[in-house]
Image: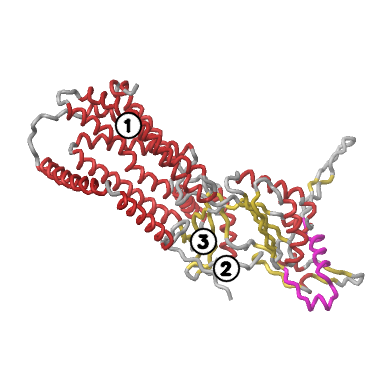
Amino acid sequence: MFSKFIQRPVLSIVISLVIVFLGVLAISYLPVTQFPSISPPKVNITAEYPGANNELLIKSVVIPLERALNGVPGMKYIASDAGNDGEASIQVVFNLGTDPNQASLNVQNRVAAVTNKLPPLVVREGVKITREESNMLMYINLYSKDPKMNQNFLYNFADINLLAELKRIDGVGFADILGDRDYAMRIWLKPDRMQAYKISVDEVMKALDEQSLEASPGKTGESSGKRSQAFEYVLKYSGRFNTKEGYENIVLRANANGEMLRLKDVADVDFSASAYNLYSTLNGKASAAIVLKQSYGSNASQVIKDVKAKMAEIKASSFPKGLDYEVSYDVSKFLDASIEKVIHTLVEAFILVGLVVFLFLGDWRSTVIPAIAVPVSLIGTFVFMSFFGITLNLITLFALVLAIGVVVDDAIVVIEAVHAKMENDPKLSVLRATQEAMKEISGAIIAITFLMASVFIPVTFMSGPVGIFYRQFSITMATAIILSGIVALTLTPALCAIMLKNNHGHAKKKTIVDRFLDGFNRGFAKLSGKYELVLTKVVSRRLVTFGVLILFCLGIWGLSGSVPSGFIPNEDQGMVYAIIQT
C-alpha cells in the first residue's frame, strides 16, 4: 500500500505541502493568549436605587432579582452585594463550558420578567446586565499637563471621544472608565434650611419631576381636512434644565401673595461629577483610567496593536493641546516575552535534535530528511488546534517542544531501517532498500503511533479548569504524533528513495568530520558494551532489580510530598496591585 508513495514521491511531497500550507494559514488565525481561558462565564447585574440603604436594596431589589435568576440554565451559583451608596450588584456564575452569549441572553430574559416588580426609581435608573470578561488586556491613562483639565473633564472627554471607538475594535470584549464621573447637576440639600421651611425631600423630588422634564408639546394650526389653515407651527420645548441657574430657580412652594420658595433657598446646586467614589492619578497628575479586556478567542497581541493604532489616530485628530495618554499596563509585553522564550526553546530543541541525529547517523543526507519531516508534523498540528478551538499559548507551545523529540523518532526509524537494508546488501538500490524496509516496519510505525496517541487522547476527556489545560496539551501532542506517523509512511520513505545513497561497502575519503564520527562511534560502542555487561549481571539478580525499583518509588513518593505544588507558577509581570485599608 505504502509502496505507491515511494514510487510516486511527488504525491508524498504534495500531501506534505498541503499540510504545511494549511498549517501556516491556521497560525495566522489562532488566538494568542498566555494560558487557556479557564474561568467560567459570569454575568453581572447592577442596579441603582438613589438614597436607599443596604437593607432597602436587599428587600426591594436583590431578593426579587435573585428569585427570578435562580435556576437559569447552566447556573452554578449566585453572589450578590448591596451597599449604603444605593448600588446593588448580582453576579451569576455559570458552569464551565456554558455558552457566554446564551447565558447573558437567559439572564436578560429573567430580569426583564421582574422589572415591573422593582421600585420606579430603580427602573428609571436602569438595570445593567453585562457579561464579565476575565482576560485583562491593558490600562490606558488619559492625562493633561494643563491644570484646567481636571479629572471630570478627562473622564467625560474619554467617555465621549475614546470609549465608543475602542469598543468597536475587533477583539475588545470590555472597555470602561474606572469610576463614575459623568457630568451631572448635583443638588446638596441643607437639612437645617429644610427644617426651617418644613419641606421634605419628597416635595423637592416632586418639584424636580414636574418642572425639569422632557416633553413633546406637538404642533398647532394643523389642517383638519375640513378647512385649510394658513399657518402650522411646530412647538418646541427646551426640555430639562441644563444650567445651574435653571435648577436654582425651581419653585418648591408659592402662595397667593407672590412669595416663592426656590430650590436655591434650601440647597446648593453644583455642576460637577455624578460620583466621587474613585480618584485616578498618573505620576501625580489627574487622569482617566480606561480598562480594556480581551474577548474570548481573540488574538491579544493583535488587539493591543489595533488599540494603540486607534489611540494614535484619535490623538492626532481630536486631542486638544496639552492632553496626552499613556499605556500604563500592557499584557502583550509579558505575553510576547514568554512566547518568544518558548519559541527560542522550540528552535533550540529542533537544532539539538538535528545535531544528535547527525552525530549518530553520520550522514548529512540522513540528517536532512528528519529536518524536513519534523516541521511538516509540527506545522500541520496548528490546523487541528484551530479545528478544536485551541489557542496558541504557553501550554500548547510547550507541547510542541516535547513533540519534537517524539515525532523525530518515526523518521529515524525509517532511515535506520533503510540503512540496515543497504548495509546487509551493498548492491541493493536505494529504492529497493526503501521498499523492503517499509514492508517490514510500516506495521510497527502504525502500532507505535496509535500507542503513543492512546496515552494522550483519554486525557482530553478530563473536566474542570485543570482538564482544559490537559485537554489542550494532550490534543496538541496526539495530533503531532499522528501526523508524524502519516509523514513517516508517506514523505520520509519518498525522501529516503530520492536523497540517500548506498555507500556501504565502498571506501571513501576520510574527512575531519568522518574521523570525529568514527571516534565517537568507537567510544559509544565501548560504552554500550560496558552497559550490556552491567545489565547482564543485574538482570539475573531479581532482588537487586526490584530493590532499585522500590527505592525509586519511595524516592518519588517522598519528593512529591516535599516539592511545592500549585496550579499556575507565579511569574513577575512587572505590576504591583495593592489594597490599603484603614
222 horizontally vs 62: left or right? right
Q: Kindly indicate whether the residue at mark 1 contacts the one at mark 2 (C-beta within 8 angstroms).
A: no
Q: Quadrant of residue 272?
A: bottom right
Residue that protrudes farthest toward the right in the picture: 256
Q: Which residue is mark 3?
A: 142
Q: Is residue 540 left or right of residue 422?
A: right
581, 234: nearer the viewer: 581
Q: Which residue is mark 2?
A: 279
Which residue does the numbered mark 1 point to in the structure image?
A: 488
Please state, as top left, top right, bottom left or bottom right, where the N terminus lies in the image: top left
Residue 159 can be seen, yes or no: yes
Residue at x-position 92% and y-position 70%? 256
Where residue 570 sits: x, y (%)?
44, 60
Q: Amino acid at mark 1?
A: Ala
Q: Nearer the viewer, residue 148 or 183?
A: 183
Q: Which residues are magenta?
A: 187-213
- In the rendered image, residue 201 lying in the magenta stretch gets the answer yes
Nearer the observer, disc 2 or disc 1?
A: 1
Measure the C-alpha gap from mark 3 to mark 1.
Answer: 57 Å
Crowd band around label 2 with a 10 angstrom C-alpha radius: few (<14), some (14–19), many (20+): some
Say whether disc 2 or disc 1 marks the residue closer to the N-terminus. Answer: 2
Q: Nearer the viewer, mark 3 or mark 1?
A: 1
- Whether residue 412 sits left or right of residue 258 in the image: it is left
Q: Position of residue 406 (x, y in %)?
A: 34, 41
The C terminus lies in quadrant: bottom right
Structural distance between the alpha carbons of marks 2 and 1: 63 Å
Q: Residues within 10 Å of mark 3 (few under 14, many from 20)?
A: many
Would you say the magenta stretch is mainly helix, strand or loop?
helix
Q: Amino acid at mark 2?
A: Tyr
Residue type at mark 3 is Leu
